[in-house]
Amino acid sequence: MAEVLNGAMTAKELETDQEVRWCPGCGDYSILKQVQKVIPELGIKREDIVFISGIGCSSRFPYYMNTYGMHSIHGRAPAVVSGLKSTNPDLSVWMITGDGDSLSIGGNHLIHLLRRNFDINVLLFNNQIYGLTKGQYSPTSEEGKTTKSTPMGSLDHPFNPAALCLGADSTFYARTMDRDPVHMRDILLKASHHKGTSMIEIYQNCNVFNDGAFFGMTDKETKKQQTLFVEHGKPLIFGQNNEFGIKLDGFKPVIVNMDSASADDLWIHDEKDRAKANILARFYGNPATEGELPRPFGVFYSEDRPCYEDLLVNQVEVAKEKFGEGDLNALLRGKNTWTIG
Amino acid sequence: MPPTNTSMSATLETTKEITILFAGDSGDGIQLTGTQFTDTNALFGNDLSTFPNFPAEIRAPQGTLAGVSGFQLHFGSIEIFTPGDECDALVVMNVAALKANLKSLKKGGIIIANTDGFDAKNLRLAKVESGISPLEDGSLSNYKVYPIEVTKLTRECLKDSGLGTKDIDRTKNMFVLGFVLWMFDRTLDPTIKFVSEKFKKKPEIVDANVKVLKAGYHYGDTTETATTRFSVDKAEMPKGTYRNMMGNQATALGLIAASKRSGLELFYGSYPITPASDVLHELAKHKNFGVKTFQAEDEIAAVASAIGASFGGALGVTASSGPGIALKGEAIGLALMLELPLVIVNVQRGGPSTGLPTKTEQADLLQAVYGRNGEAPVAVVAAATPADCFNMAFEACRLAVQHMTPVFFLSDGYLANGAEPWKFPTEDELPSFKGNFATPSDLKDGEYLPYERDENLVRKWAIPGTLGLEHRVGGIEKQDGTGNISYDPDNHQHMVNTRAQKVANIAKNVPLQDIELGSKTGKVLVLGWGSTYGAIKAAVKDLTEEGHSVSHAHVRYLFPFPQNFEEVLRSFDTVLIPEMNMGQLRMMIRSEFLIPAVGLNKVKGIPFTKGEIKNKVLELLDQLIK
Ligand SMILES: Cc1ncc(C[n+]2csc(CCOP(=O)(O)OP(=O)(O)O)c2C)c(N)n1
Ligand code: SF4
C-alpha cells in the first residue's frame, strides 16, 4: 500500500503488499533486502525512483519495491531505461536483470547502454543459470555444464561479464555477491553515487538449479583463499591470513607470498586505471585450483564521462538557442510556397 | 535569366497535363533532376503527383537495366491524382533507361535522349542484341526523338572552368533539366536558388551548375531541336497557400504538430531502414521543437525506448518498415499491456523478409492488425496521399494519447517518396488534445489504482516523479484496477475482453466513413486504403463522368473501422477492393461483415494505374448486368 510520503523513508516502507515469490533460500532475497536498506540512505524521494527489469526470476524485483516500476520484456530493459532517462533525466533509475536476460537475449542492448553511459544503476544478478525457465545453462555457465538442455555438457564458452562491460566502455563496473551483505551494501552506495551507467554484477545463488555455484567464494573455509577484495589505493592482498599478494610483472599478475614481499611491491588498486581494470577482469578460471588467481570483488573501474541524457538535453537547448524555440506555423509553411486565389 | 516565351524557333502549345519520366543511372542525378522540375512546377501553381523509383543498390551497375533509376512526374492545370499511367515525355540518360521505360511512353510521345549514353559499351550493358542503337535502327519512328549529346555539350560548356572531368560530368543532369525547363516553359529561378544554397560553400560548383543549366535552356531555344514547346497553366485548386510536400516529411511534421498540440514532448526511437529513414532525418533537424530523436541499436531497442519514454510521460513514437516492425511485435504487445500511448509508424515496402526494399507494397495490414502473440488488438490508421501522412500521423498520436494504447500509422514507400501540393494548415486549425495525467487526488484511501478506468475503459497516465502515485506495471497479466500480477482465469478473460472493448471504443472517436466520390448508393463501391487513393479516385472520376454507377470510399481508420462502415459498404451491390497485396483488407471485410467483397490485387512493387482499376470496375459492371 502506497503511503503518500516525501523524503525520509525506511526499508520497511519500500516493501510492497505483494508476496515475494522467489524460491525459499534464493539469493535474490538478500539482494532485495540490501537494496531496500540502502535506498533510504540515498536521500532520493521515493516518487523519483524507478525500477525497470526484463524477464527472469530476478526481474520480478520491481513488484517488491514500493517505488515506480516496470517489469518489461526479456532482455529489453536497457532500451526501456534509455527512453525513460532521455525524457526524464532527473529520475533515479535502477535496472534489474539476470545473466540470461542481459547477456543472452539482451546482450546487444546492454553493450549499447554501457557505451552511451546513461546515468543508471544496473544490478546484474548472475546465477550462471536460467532460473525462470527451470534450469538451462546460461551465457555465464562454465564450459561442459550439464543441464536439461545440455545433458552431455554445454559446448559454449562462457561470457566474462566484467570483460564484456569494460570492453563496451562501461564507466563503472563492480562485482559483489549475495552472501556478503556488508560488501554489497558498500558497492550499492558507491554505484548510486557514480554518475553514469553503474554496472554491478552480483553473484547470486540459485539454490534450485545451480546451488553452490559460488560457494567456494562465499563459504567461510574457502572464501579468503578464493576471493580478492579490491579497494581504491589499497594493495591487492588475499589469503586465509592475508598471506598472499599480487604483483604485476609487466602485464602479468603474479601471486607473491607476503613473507618474501612487502606491501609496497604489490599492485595498488586504482579505480581510474582502465588497463589494470581489464587485467582484473581476466582473473577468472576456477579459483579453487592451485595457483589460479582469486576472483576479485569491489569496484574495478570508475570513470567520469558525460551522460547521454545530459548531452541530449543539451543538444535540444543548443538547437533552441541557434534556431529559436520551434515555431509550428513556420515549420508547416516551409520555405517555398505559392498562393492561389 | 532567360525570360519565358521568347523562343525563336518553337511554337508554344498549351496542354492540360503532362506526364514526364526522367530515367538514367542512379549516379546520373535523376532523383534530383526530377525533384527540381517538380518543385518548379509546384511553385508555378500546377497540381501534381510524383513517383520516384530507384534501384536497391546505392550504386547499381552502371548502364544496366538493373541500375535504372526513374522519377515520374504528372503535373497539370487540372486536378492530378496519380503520377500518370502513360508518359508524354521520356528523358533518358542511356540506352538501358530507354529500354526499361519505353513501354510506358505514349505513341507519339517525346524522347529526350542523351546520345552519349548510347555508345557500343552502353548497348552491350543494356543487352541490345543487334548492337545497333535504337536511336538509329528506326524502331522509334512512332515517337518524337530529340537526341542530344549531353556529355559532350556539358564538357564543352565547362572546358574553361578549371574543373576536372568528373566534376564536369556530374553537372550533366543540369543540362537536361535546363532543356526540359525550356521545353515546358518554366523558369530557371528555383533551380538556381537551390543550387546556390546547396553548394553555398563551393561557388565554383554553383557557377558550373548554373552555367550548364542555362546552356541546356539556350540549347533548346536556339538549336531548333524541338519545334514544339508545351505550356501547362496553373491548376484551379482551392484558394490558399500551398507548398510541395513528400510523405515522410509530412509524417515527421504530423508528429511534431501532435507534440505541439498536446504539449507532450516527442521522443522518437528508430533504427534506419528504407523507406522509413527520412522520417528520422527530418525529425532530427527539429530539435528546437524539443524533439528527442534516438537512433537505437536495433528495432527492438527503438520500440522499447519509445515505451520507456511514454512511461516517463512523453509521446513515444517508433518507426520502421516491415522487417523492423516484425521485430517490434513483442514490445508492441507490452505497450498494450502497460496501456501506455505508443505510435508505431510502418512505412511499408515490398516483402516478405527483406523483400523489395525500395519498392512499394501495402502487405503489412494484417501484420499491423493481427501480428502479435495473444489477443493483442492495436488500433491502425493509414494515410491516402503524401500530404495526408501529416493528418494521419497526427491522428495516430491523438488516438494513442486519448486512449492510452499503441496505434499503428501505415504509410508506404510510394507515399513516403511521392510528392504533392499541400495546402498546409496553421497551428490553430489543428485540434489540441491532452494526456489524462493522474494526480495525487486520484488516490483512494491513500492507495493508487493504476488500472482504474474511465467510461471508455481508459486508464490514467501516472508519471514517475509524481508523489503518491508509485505503481508497478508490466507485460505479465495483471489484475484490473490494482495492476498486480494475476493468473486468475476469470481475470484474464476479463482483461482480454476489456482491452478489446477499449480498442473498439476508439471507433467512437474517429470520423464517420464518407464517400470520396460518387453517390452514396449504387452498383459498385471501390473501397481503397492507403496509397491506392490516387489511382482509384482517378479511375472512379472517369467512370462517373462516363455515366457509370460507381463510387469511391477510402478508409483511413482500419482498426477499428468507423461506426457507420458496414452501412456504407452495404449501400452498394458490389464492393471492389484494389490493394497492393493479395487481399488483406478484403479478408478483414469479409470476416467482419460477411460481405463478399471482390479483390483487385497486385504485388509488383509498382502502384496501380488508373486503367487497371477502370478495367476491373467495367468488368464487374458487365457481370452485374448479366
Ligand atoms: C522472448 C522471450 N524468450 C524467452 C523467454 C523465456 N525466458 C524467460 S526468463 C529466461 C531466462 C532467465 O534467465 P536469467 O536472465 O538468468 O534470469 P533468472 O531467472 O536466472 O533470474 C528465458 C529464456 C521469454 N520470456 N521471452
Ligand atoms: S529458480 Fe533459482 S533464481 Fe529463480 S527464484 Fe528459484 S532459486 Fe531463485
Image: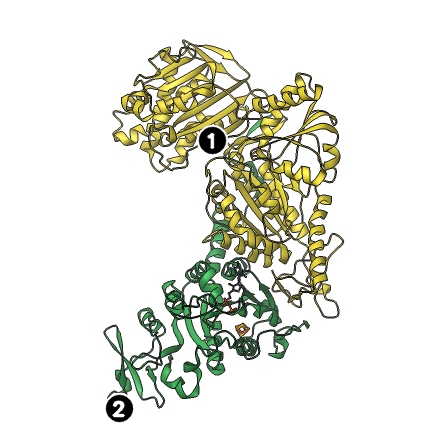
| Above/below status of B380 relative to B95 | below
A43 vs B121, left or right, is: right
Q: Which residue is mark 2?
A: A259
Residue B134 in sight here: yes
| Above/below status of B261 relative to B178 | below
* Amino acid type of the residue that numbered disc 2 sits on in the rendered structure: Asp
B610 vs B32, left or right, is: right
Residue A272 in the image, given as x and y percentages of width and height: 35, 71
Task: Give the residue displayed 56% in from the left and 72% down from the top.
Answer: A44
Judged from the image, the secondary structure of the residue bearing numbered disc 1 is strand
Comparing B453 with A154, the one in front is A154
Q: How is the image coloured?
A: by chain
Q: Quadrant of the N terminus of chain B?
A: top left
Residue A1 in the image, given as x and y percentages of width and height: 68, 72
Comparing A132 with B156, the one in front is A132
Establish whether ligand 2 lies closer than 8 Å to the Cβ of label 2.
Answer: no
Comparing B83 with B267, the one in front is B83
Locate residue B131: give its quadrant. top left
Task: Give the residue displayed 41% in from the left and 21% down from the top.
Answer: B91
Which chain shows up in green?
A
- Label 2 lies in what chain? A
B190 vs B94, left or right, is: right
Which chain shows up in yellow?
B
Locate residue A262: give its quadrant. bottom left
Q: Which residue is mark 1?
A: B52
- Label 1 lies in what chain? B
| Above/below status of A121 relative to A40 | above
Evaluate if marks 1 and 2 touch, with contact meaning CB atoms under 8 Å apart: no
* Amino acid type of the residue that numbered disc 1 sits on in the rendered structure: Pro
Q: Quadrant of the C terminus of chain B?
A: top right
Q: CA distance from mark 1 to mark 2?
A: 80 Å
Residue A271 in the image, given as x and y percentages of width and height: 36, 74
